[in-house]
Image: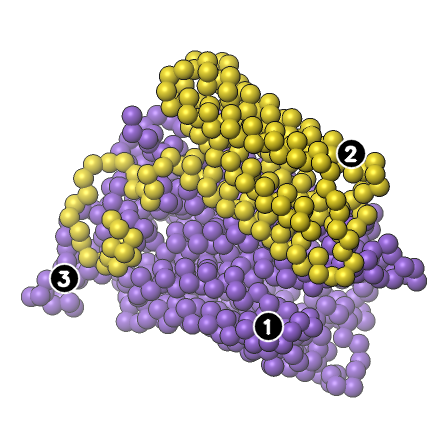
Chain colours: A yellow, B purple
Amino acid sequence: MSFYKNVTAKPWEYTSPTLGTGPESAFQSPSERIALTLFLVVVGVIFSLLAVSYYVRMELGDWVPMADPTLLWVNTAFLIVSSVLFQLARNTAQGANFLRARTLFVGAGLFAIFFVIGQALAWQQLGNNGFNVAHGPASAFFYLLTGMHALHIVGGLWVWSKTTWRFFNQSELSNVKLSVELCTTYWHFLLVLWVFIFAVLANT
Amino acid sequence: MAYVPLADQDHELHDPHTFITKYVWSQDHKVIAIQYGSTAICVGLVALILSMMMRLQLGFPDSFTLIAPSSYYQAVTMHGMIMVVYLLTALFLGGFGNYLIPLMCGTRDMVFPYLNMLSFWVYLLSVLILMSSFFVTGGPTGAGWTLYPPQTITPGTPGHDTGILLMLISLGVFIVAFTMGGLNYVTTVLQARAKGLTMMRLPLSVWGILVATILGLFAFPALLVSAIMMTFDLTLGTSFFMPAIMAAGEQLDYNGGSPILFQHLFWFFGHPEVYIVALPAFGLVSDVLATHARKNIFGYRMMVWAIIAIGGLSFIVWAHHMYVSGMNPYFGFFFATTTLIIAVPTAMKVYNWVLTLWEGDIRLNTPMLFAIGFVFTFIHGGLTGLFLGNVVIDLPLSDTYFVVAHFHMVMGVSPVLVLFASLYHWYPKITGRMMNETLGKVHFWCTFLGTYAIYLPMHYLGFLGVPRRYYAMGSTDFIPESAQTLNANITLAALFVATAQILFFINVFWSLRNGKPSGNNPWGATSLEWQTPETPPKHGNWGPEMPVVHRWAYDYSVPGYPQDFIPQNVPGDFGVSEDHDHDTDMVKGPLAK
């Protein structure tokens, strides 16, 4: 039923008998996808609020812009490669090539791990140059934003590792297909998020 | 192969065999609901004891010297945070949400049972972390539940080093638990309803809990973000919120932060939070009123839209908590306007509750008494909110006992009356036994009249200008001595009400063994949870056949039908026929006099 028909229905009136069984669902997608979408909305709200706080804090007089380590560009490249590999893994998983899907999926995760390591190295670089967390508001936000983002990558890697385990412990693509799709969506979201974060950090 | 949601797959989702998997590490939503509820009530009792200590200090400051000023503020803070977050939010959403959603939606369990189980244990962890703050050096934080910087983390505030850290960590953990639970509730309601159960046929309990959960998913991030930034300020020396400030005669190492930023973030969470508590209460009380008045809820569609409107509007009223913070007065005008606007759908709900009762076949049993008590106290509390929502009147009333009386009425008394109504109403479903009516009625009258005795006079104290968060009133020129007498009387009323709650607990435990067996549907209710083949519902809820829904949840007193209620899963059209006389055709249902 269309949304309009749904909301203007008169629920006290009897409608013709309902046939068959099976759930009434608002959306055709699997429940896990709905849950992931909701979760991504929550993550989006978190980072939006962090961005608002960033801009508010920036206006408060003691803001000294901070140069970002060039390592961040390398890490961005890693994350892009990771997303591309996830997408390829997802496309492959729609077909029948189990081994190719598995290789791509594992590779995608590996590049995400490189990203996280690279971020940690960038932190170390900054720290060695005297830009520790409490150095100023710009550096505080740098660590906060990149840290929160990396935390979400690590959470995604936890799910990735469980799916990788399943990839290696059985050989039916249909058992991992949904997880591959959802991981891909999650990684694309985190990539777009990272681009925004990086843009905000680099321009202020 | 068509996708079948987890909650409707024919095979067992989770197959508990041992005591541990059935009652401890359980993935069954009913067990998880009881775990949530018991934990919430236990920690709520801790907060109740704290409030009694506060009241003793306030009522008898000279004779009762046990509580030092710093302990008083610690009690205030922990009482507030526990009650709002760890009791009300957890009990309404984790307790009632978990129990009722799968049953009212006609499904076997939540769509993610393992995540559901995890959410309880993470919630329990957050409670334990919070309780541990009582035992660390310096004790729990005494910053007020609003945790405003800079005072929260400067010396002079109790618990400013470890207590606040544990509080912030506990809040973060709670938010993780809430998010896990919230994903479950929303996805289950959207995706796993029984065949024929359209969204507009759902009972209002589900609507209230659904919208409240969505609110929580959007609002708790603001608390998370502010908690993380405050933790950074506390532990890493950053200055998100901390301005240049001196403490104990020394310049602290902070500079440039904005305390107002914290207030905005906190109240962006804080206002939706009160609706996260209120909306499930609105939904649950609608169902209790309809069932015990044998009448459909008046204006069901408007009630649904009002819930949604209140939910949406709740995000644009937050700065009515900040009128005296020094922000631009034009902001105050904006938020006062939106606050008045949000009063409109809320008032419409009140009218609809009253109209539901109008000319209904009212059964004044214990759940109904509590539900009607809710309507009284909520009107009262809501009206005082209109005063506070206007900038000019808020200026002298802010941070006085008028505010304390207002929010206790709308958050403490009204939703708690709904909690009692719901517990008395659904106890037969959860346990298979009826609670004792006499004990219940005594409990009701003591609680209802007692809470009025506490909070009605408190408004007057607020008018006089008695400030809140003062551990003793002291003597001032503008507050007469009689105000202290009033304080003492309020304390006595509070002690009486707190003691009266013992009756409830006696009733709960006594009725477990000795209550009259209830059968499946003692109240003659229409919604699906009362149509389970067994009571209490066994694992899987429905037996081999899933229910199919043919009507909305409010077919009470349908003319021409032999019973005064038609369960949702009964097929057939029993529409009003023109040649039937309304009064003579009705045969009363199981509870008719």
> Residue B545: which disc?
none
Can you give x and y, in whole percent of width and height, for residue B182 in the image? 49, 45
Q: Tag 2: residue type?
A: Gln
Q: Secondary structure at mark 3?
A: loop
How far apart marks 1 and 3 lie (CA) works out to: 52 Å
Q: Is residue B333 above or below residue A202?
A: below
Residue matched to label 3: B576
At a point 69% along the width and 55% down the height, the residue shown is B78
First in sequence: mark 1 vs mark 3? 1
How far apart marks 1 and 2 lie (CA) works out to: 43 Å
Q: Is residue A123 above or below residue B157?
A: above
Q: Is residue A91 left or right of residue B489?
A: left
At a point 24% along the width and 36% down the height, the residue shown is A21
Q: Chain of mark 2?
A: A
Q: Quadrant of residue B350?
A: bottom left
Q: Secondary structure at mark 1?
A: helix
Seen from this angle, which residue lies furthest left?
B579
Residue matched to label 2: A124
> Residue B331: which disc?
1
Which of the two discs, 1 and 3, sits closer to the camera? 1
Which of the two discs, 1 and 2, sits closer to the camera? 2
Q: Tag 3: residue type?
A: Val
